[in-house]
Structure formats: structure tokens, C-alpha cells
Image (cartoon, grey):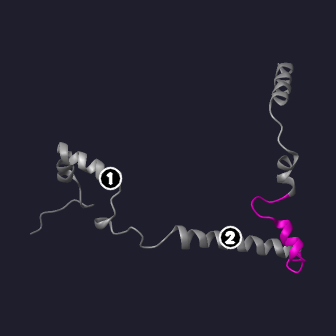
Amino acid sequence: MSGLLRSAVAVGRLSSPRLPANLTQANKASMPFIPQDWVFRFFPGLTRDKVRFMLRFNQVSFSMGLGFFYLWCHTPYKCDQYDHFEESYLYSWVKGNMQKTGEFDENVRIKVRHFYPQTAEE
């Protein structure tokens, strides 16, 4: 059984296209998306203490990620007026088709507009 597995792996290696060496060695030589060698080359004062540089690099990267999430991706009070939201073309088309067939009136009639059961206290 192991002979069959060994031969299948060998055939797979021969038939697959080879990637360039700089791509296969990238995970051993660099960090993704960030040219750290430029920082070490052009800012030797920043990278004199390698441990402190990596600590600051991690802190800055975390802060930038948090800032990106909360300042850009999480826009407060954006599209929270649910009674006056902008209707997309698909929404308008489906709503128009439902109004033509009468399904829209039925959906409005049975729509629940409150969370807790209403009691008759008058």
C-alpha cells in the first residue's frame, strides 16, 4: 500500500508545474504585504533594537487594524433610520411585483410591528 502511495506522490510531483524559487521561499524570507527589509535598510535608528522594533510594529499594526475597523468600517449612525432607508432597484422591483399580485398587502397585514404581546389595557 505504501508503494502505491509513494508512486502516486512521485507522479503528482512530476506533473505539477513548478513555481519560481522566489515565490516558494517567500514565507521563509519575508512577511506578507510589508517590505520589512526596507525598514531595516532605510531606518537603522528605528531598528537598532530588534525586539523593541517588533513590539512597536505589533502595537502599531494592532492599532491601525482597530482604527480601520472602528473609524472606517463601522460608521456610526449610518443607515440606521429604518423607516426612511434608500430602497435598492431589486427591492423596488420585488415590491412592485408583490403589489401587482396582492402579496404585499397580505405581508403588511400580518407583519408583526411589536416585540412583546400587546395587552388590552384601556
Query: For this rendering, which residue is in front, 40 or 53?
Result: 40
Rendered position, 73 above or below 9:
below
Q: Is residue 34 magenta?
A: yes
Residue under pointer 1? 91
Query: What residue is rendered at 71% in x and 70% in y?
Result: 61
> Is the Cβ of the residue at disc 1 closer than 8 Å to that at disc 2?
no
Say the numbered circle drawn on residue 62.
Answer: 2
**Amino acid type at mark 2:** Phe
Q: Residue at x 84, y 72 (%)?
A: 39
Q: Main secondary structure of the magenta part?
A: loop
Q: Position of residue 118 (x, y in %)?
A: 18, 61
| Relative horizontal placement of residue 75, taking residue 38 as reference (left or right) | left
Q: Position of residue 42 (x, y in %)?
A: 87, 75
Secondary structure under tag 2 reads: helix
Q: Quadrant of the N terminus?
A: top right
Res 49 → quadrant: bottom right
Residue 80, label in figure: none
Residue 89 colored in magenta in the image: no
**Residue kind at label 1, given as amino acid type:** Tyr
Q: Indicate which label's residue lies in the foreground, 1 or 2.
A: 1
> What secondary structure is found at the residue carrying circle 1?
helix
Position of 21 compared to 93: left or right? right
Residue pushed farthest bottom?
Answer: 45
Gap in angstroms between the C-alphas marked 1 and 2: 38 Å
Which of pointers 1 and 2 lies earlier in the amino acid sequence? 2
Specify few, some or many for label 2: CA neighbours under 10 Å numbering under 14, 14-19, or 20 or more: few
Q: Residue drawn 17% across and 50% down?
A: 105
Percent of width and height locating residue 11:
83, 24
Q: Which residues are magenta?
A: 30-49
- Determine whether 24 is above or below 58 in the image: above
